[in-house]
């Protein structure tokens, strides 16, 4: 047996490298889930690599169908038909009416002539249409016994619900089963791919989100943790002198930093200043923003004389607007962008919005833990911002259960002093490093963010009700 690529984006990663050849794989699901797109993409992409491929269909005009419905995809290359790498074999209705032996004889006649490496049968339901349960079982037995001798990778599509698939004779006859579903996801639908069975392979089971785009069927594997290969003790400047001092010399390289605070406290500016510090040192960075679109990010940055477009043109900066993606698709895009621009720093602005991008079966803490490990292995220092609900008073850091996965937690908040709203910053946690425990004033000016002196005259700042310290109150009393 030989392992061969699937030709489908993301599917090789789930199967640990691809399909086995020879084998028989059933691609099942309800109508409209993308079964034909997946198998045709596999066929055409592998034909480009000089495989001989064969497409078997019971439709009367298969070439017209392919031209009409597949030509919109970039993988469809009509020149492969002329070259002979893709062969179409229509099985006429008269042959189907003559029964299973006539169908199998016609298929084997073509296979003997073409000798394909990869075969698609679309769909198997048509060949068994009208047969009772016993006749279907006999047909499938003869059909699959014949296929075992073809020495090819055979991909079969079939319209089945999950319940029908469990009861079907096909389930134990095939070597592999891929089930595609189309399920409600907030105001729209989301496709999911689940590998239920694949003999001879260690695969990642469970649901994986997927989409049909211009380049065809795309699968976005769930994130999986990998063991850390190295640990960094390098210090990475925060871009803010006072914050470098509070963190004992800057953030630790390849660490994850959560900046939490209510609206308007300066979370985005702190994160942007971190990215700008890297860009000015020729360290590429990525900005992923749920809070602002790309043009707004560029425009707002000019307030601090930061010209982001200049760094984008130099391929030092990539700005991603993530709202059109699901969470696993976004993770894959970020990974690809890191590799493309050799990024060292990442700002993900608005981490709380990730929850809505996740499928219902996934949990945000697990996602964040796995995503962080991926970034650590790529030597990325990542700042995440999250909006807390309360302006003052008692507050949660996130309320989403992700803070345990963060190496450093920075809290920004409002404090009311003498009827004036001021901003405060504190470092609540920093793994592997001593840090400043004081609560300091956080100021935003035309130069960006600055850290001022501690609010040493007051206590109770984090409660939202600061009061003079006893010593300060005593001093002021005797001054009068």
Image (cartoon, rainbow, N blue to C red):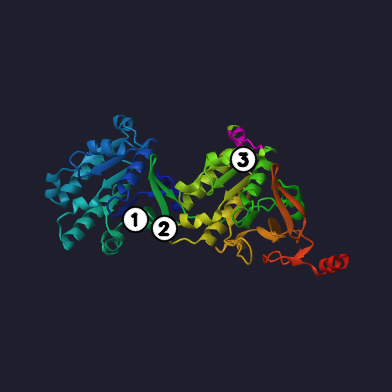
Looking at the picture, how far across and down is residue 418, in whole percent? 72, 60
- Discs 1, 2 touching: Cβ within 8 Å: yes
Callout 2 secondary element: strand
Callout 3 secondary element: helix
Q: Residue at x 49, y 62 (%)?
A: 363
Whether residue 92 sits left or right of residue 456 in the image: it is left
Q: Residue at x 29, y 40 (%)?
A: 54
From mark 3 to mark 1, how far is it between C-alphas?
A: 43 Å
Residue 283 visible in the shown view: no
Q: Residues within 10 Å of mark 2 (few under 14, many from 20)?
A: many
Q: Is residue 204 magenta?
A: no
From mark 2 to mark 3, how far is it between C-alphas?
A: 40 Å
Q: Specify the label residue 301 is tagged with.
A: 3
From the image, give the main secondary structure of the stretch colored magenta. Answer: helix
Viewer-nearest of discs 3 and 1? 3
Residue, disc 1: 181
What is the count of numbered marks?
3
Q: Residue at x 47, y 48 (%)?
A: 323
Counting residues from the start of the chain, the first of labels 3 and 1 encountered is 1
Q: Specify the label residue 207 is tagged with.
A: 2
Whether residue 21 sits left or right of residue 256 in the image: it is left
Magenta residues, start to end: 305-312
In front of the other: 160 or 258 = 258
Looking at the picture, how far across and down is residue 185, in whole percent? 39, 56
Whether residue 92 sits left or right of residue 215 in the image: it is left
């Amino acid at each position: 047996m030989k392992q061969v690529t699937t030709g489908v984006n993301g599917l090789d990663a789930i199967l640990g490298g691809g399909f086995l050849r020879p084998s028989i794989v059933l691609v099942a699901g309800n109508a409209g889930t993308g079964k034909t797109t997946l198998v045709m993409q596999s066929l055409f992409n592998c034909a480009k690599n000089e495989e001989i491929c064969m497409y078997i269909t019971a439709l009367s005009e298969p070439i017209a169908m392919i031209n009409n419905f597949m030509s919109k995809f970039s993988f469809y290359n009509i020149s492969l038909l002329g070259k002979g790498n893709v062969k179409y074999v229509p099985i006429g209705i008269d042959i189907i009416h003559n029964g299973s032996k006539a169908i199998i004889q016609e298929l084997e006649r073509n296979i003997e002539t073409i000798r394909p490496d990869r075969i698609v049968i679309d769909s198997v339901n048509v060949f068994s249409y009208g047969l009772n349960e016993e006749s279907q079982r006999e047909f499938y037995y003869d059909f699959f016994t014949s296929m075992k001798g073809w020495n090819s990778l055979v991909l079969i599509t079939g319209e089945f619900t999950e319940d029908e698939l469990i009861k079907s004779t096909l389930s134990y006859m095939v070597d592999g089963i891929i089930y595609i579903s189309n399920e409600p996801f907030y105001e729209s639908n989301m496709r999911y791919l689940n590998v239920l069975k694949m003999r001879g392979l260690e695969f990642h089971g469970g649901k994986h989100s997927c989409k049909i785009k211009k380049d065809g069927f795309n699968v976005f594997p769930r994130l999986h943790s990998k063991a850390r290969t190295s640990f960094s003790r390098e210090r990475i400047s925060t871009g803010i002198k006072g914050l470098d001092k509070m963190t004992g010399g800057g953030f630790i390289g390849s660490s994850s930093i959560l900046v939490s605070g209510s609206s308007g406290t300066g979370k985005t500016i702190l994160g942007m200043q971190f990215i700008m510090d890297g860009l000015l040192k020729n360290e590429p960075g990525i900005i992923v923003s749920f809070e602002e679109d790309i043009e707004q990010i560029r425009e707002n940055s000019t307030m601090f004389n930061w010209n982001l477009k200049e760094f984008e043109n130099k391929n030092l900066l990539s700005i991603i607007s993530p709202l059109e993606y699901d969470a696993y698709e976004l993770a894959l895009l970020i990974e690809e962008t890191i590799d493309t621009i050799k990024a060292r720093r990442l700002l993900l602005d608005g981490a709380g919005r990730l929850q809505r991008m996740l499928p219902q079966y996934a949990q945000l803490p697990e996602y964040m833990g796995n995503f962080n490990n991926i970034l650590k292995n790529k030597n990325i220092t990542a700042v995440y911002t999250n909006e807390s609900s309360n302006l003052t008073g008692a507050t949660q850091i996130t309320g989403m259960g992700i803070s345990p996965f963060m190496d450093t937690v920075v809290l920004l908040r409002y404090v009311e002093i003498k009827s004036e709203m001021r901003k405060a910053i504190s470092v609540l946690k920093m793994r592997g490093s001593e840090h400043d425990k004081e609560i300091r004033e956080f100021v935003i000016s035309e130069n960006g963010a600055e850290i001022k002196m501690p609010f040493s005259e007051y206590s109770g700042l984090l409660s939202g009700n600061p009061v003079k310290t006893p010593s300060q109150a005593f001093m002021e009393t005797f001054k009068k």
